[in-house]
Image (cartoon, helix red, strand yellow):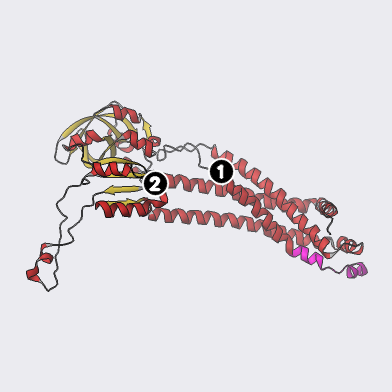
Amino acid sequence: MINWKVILGIARKHLLSKFKSTLTATLGVTFGITAYITLVSFMTGLNGMLDDLILNQTPHIHIYNEIRPSENQPVTLSKALEPGEHIVRHIKPRSEERNIYNGMPLLKYLKTQPEVLGATPRLSTQIFYLSGSIELGGTLTGVDILEEVRLSSINDYIIEGRPRDLKNTENGILLGAGLAKKMSLRPGDRLQISTVKGEIYPLKVVGFYQSGIADIDNIQSYVNLKTAQRILGENSGYITDINVKLQNLEKAPVIASDIERQFRVEARDIQEANAQFETGSNIRNLITYAVSVTLLIVAGFGIYNILNMLIYEKMNDIAILKAIGFTGKDVQSIFMSQALIIGFIGGASGLFFGYILSLIIDRVPFNTEALPTISTYPINFNPWYYVVGIVFALVSTFFAGYLPSRKARTIDAVKIIRGN
């Protein structure tokens, strides 16, 4: 039976007698774990920020009425021209409204479903913003702003004004920051817009919206849903889009398919809408983890080399230990203990310094107009990364010490003593 008190005492003595080599091996593990924690925390934090930038502005399910050509043309429906092959060129879209048929009843139905956290109506239309003699094209979206705030992160992107200001101002408009900058507008200023039919409406600027995506901020604006309906001369049931937020995001594709089948509308789920973005995000995460693991493996090789040299330097000690009754298993346990001690101390130090470095980065100012919700560099303090770090430190040092310790176990003490 192994006497661990004696084994650990000898291991400690060996480590302290070669303090420089021990310190070098420990610092190798410390550096590897520190770099791993800092890199994975920063990169996953950055990826999370980019994901939120896109996904926070994408509903779980977007319901709308797609304008498309008729599948069946008159020539294909005529029995007099059968049989035969019909070729029809330059097919025009069907003449139909952009609004969702029975949109409000559909909205009420969605709100009663247990899988649905909430649903908000929208009315989007193309307009012109009038600035002196200049006309800027853009998109006007009518929304229930308080419901949008409850179900999305739109409030985080309102850089001036409040959502309630828009709700309480019948002719209010929330402008994209890029658009407001082009037209030199401030909250409280008056603005005129023109519909595609040429009708002009005066509106009051109540705030600015900045999504962080310049192409959106240069054209997008929001008004109350009733205001948008009045501008277009439509009734209170006229809506062009419904944004749905679910209790469980993973069910979005199935629920979207059910909505399309039941109500004959287009329903695009968030996974379909952001398929390319998710692919890029997965690749970035894969690169992050690959680089992190490489750092830990390099630290493990450093420990292997140092323990291997330590065994050659301790040949006489190993021979004496075996001569006084220590078995090969005891000798192997001594060197395995040294490896694990180095791994634990180096790993714990790496976690500490990685956390401190992450805290420092998390407090470094990072201000950009493109990302109004970000004030410092993003860091992800996920406890799981620290668990992985210490486990990997112990596992890598275990395997780094295993081969050298096996060599120490098989050393012939008689040959060494006779040689001396």
* Amino acid of disc 1: Phe
Front residue of 175 and 84: 84
Of the image marks 1 and 2, the number of the one nearer the N terminus: 2
How dense is the environment of label 2, judged by Cα within 10 Å: few (below 14), some, or many (20 and up)? some
Q: Residue at x 47, y 36 (%)?
A: 375
Report how many numbered discs are placed on residues in the image: 2
Which mark identifies residue 316? none
Q: Position of residue 86 (x, y in %)?
A: 13, 69
Q: Residue at x 38, y 53 (%)?
A: 271
Q: Position of residue 89 (x, y in %)?
A: 14, 64
Front residue of 140 and 250: 250
- Left or right of 130 on screen, residue 317: right
Looking at the image, the residue that sits furthest to the left is 80
In the picture, which quadrant includes the C terminus?
Answer: bottom right
Q: Residue at x 56, y 40 (%)?
A: 361
Q: Pointers 1 and 2 in contact (CB under 8 A)?
A: no
Q: Position of residue 113 (x, y in %)?
A: 34, 45
- Give the main secondary structure, helix, strand or loop, of the magenta stretch: helix
Quadrant hosting residue 75: bottom left
Q: Position of residue 292 (x, y in %)?
A: 58, 54
Q: Is residue 85 visible?
A: yes
Q: Which residue is mark 1?
A: 381
The CA distance from mark 1 to mark 2 is 21 Å
Q: Which residue is mark 2?
A: 54
In the image, residue 260 above or below residue 324: above
Q: Where does the magenta region start and end?
A: 403-420
* Amino acid of disc 2: Ile
